[in-house]
Amino acid sequence: MNIPKKAYLIIALLIISNIVLGQEDMNSNFEGVTTEIVLSEYVKESYKLSIGLPFGYDQNKEYQVLYVLDANVTFGMVNDITKLLAFEAKHPSVIVVGVAYKSTNDWMRNRGRDLMPNYSGISGDKSVSKFHQFISLELIPHINKKFKTNQTENILYGHSSGAVYGLYSLFKDPNLFKSYILTSPSVDEDSGFIVDLENKYYSKFKELNANLYTSIGSEEKESFNKIYSQFIESLKKREYINFRLNSDAVLGTHMSSMAQAFINGFHFINGNKF
């Protein structure tokens, strides 16, 4: 029997489509990870959420939620590390929520707008404040509605510009997150915004109910090292009430220190030595 070439083509396309669809379905549920797209009315931007549930997830138990910025490139690292650490009793199981963009190009184009005050001609925190509204008024309520969460123990992880946003949140909305893991915050690239924000906060408040782990890579550029060190020393001298602070130097560059710094931070916020 002769089968027309068009029929072969249709069959081949159907087979390829089924493989691709099967892979997408498999990946979206791989090892307890699901993904979804949410639209922010504040930013007017769609974000891709990756949600990693811990092994043995119990719907009747409350979990801390660890929110991960720059999740296009950081979610896998954080989700895998927290799952592994949870095998040890001293580390809690957490729900990991990665905040990503729909594509890598979108991430590269928009992360500065969302995470960094005084970015690329945008004066002050006009765009960052919209992203913060997305996080505080849309994302966190959405996750709390979907899962049984410990709403007083939220954790935020950010690196570089993501860590600058973390400091912004800490001094702008200090009750949103209980703990922060902020590695290599680019305080040398925001025209002094975070330093000024912390000064304004201290002029009004002497209490800061939070755990903050922050770090610097041993091979960071000199200009960053200087401004970061000055900022941390000033923060230590404040002696805020109810504020736990640990600043660490981790072997490596701005990027190669990321994984170890995150592990150190996760240890610290949970009251463990590292």
Image: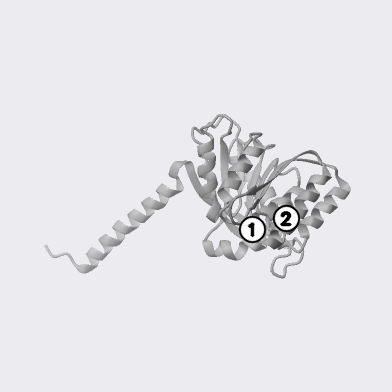
Question: What is the crowding at mark 2: few (fewer than 14 residues within 10 Å), some, or many (at least 20)?
Answer: many
Residue 85 is labelled as: none
Q: Position of residue 222 (x, y in %)?
A: 68, 61
Q: Which residue is mark 2?
A: 228
Measured in 3D between alpha carbons, the distance from the residue under mark 2 to the one under mark 1, in whole angstroms, is 10 Å
Q: Please state, as top left, top right, bottom left or bottom right, where the N terminus lies in the image.
A: bottom left
Is 223 left or right of 68, judged from the image as shown? right
30 or 240, which lies in front?
240
Is residue 105 at least partly visible in the picture?
A: yes
Say what amino acid the circle numbered 1 marks: Glu
Q: Position of residue 251 (x, y in %)?
A: 59, 50
Is 85 left or right of 10, judged from the image as shown? right
Q: Which residue is mark 1?
A: 220
Question: What is the crowding at mark 1: few (fewer than 14 residues within 10 Å), some, or many (at least 20)?
Answer: some
Q: Decide: is 60 above or below 228.
A: above
184 or 162, which lies in front?
184
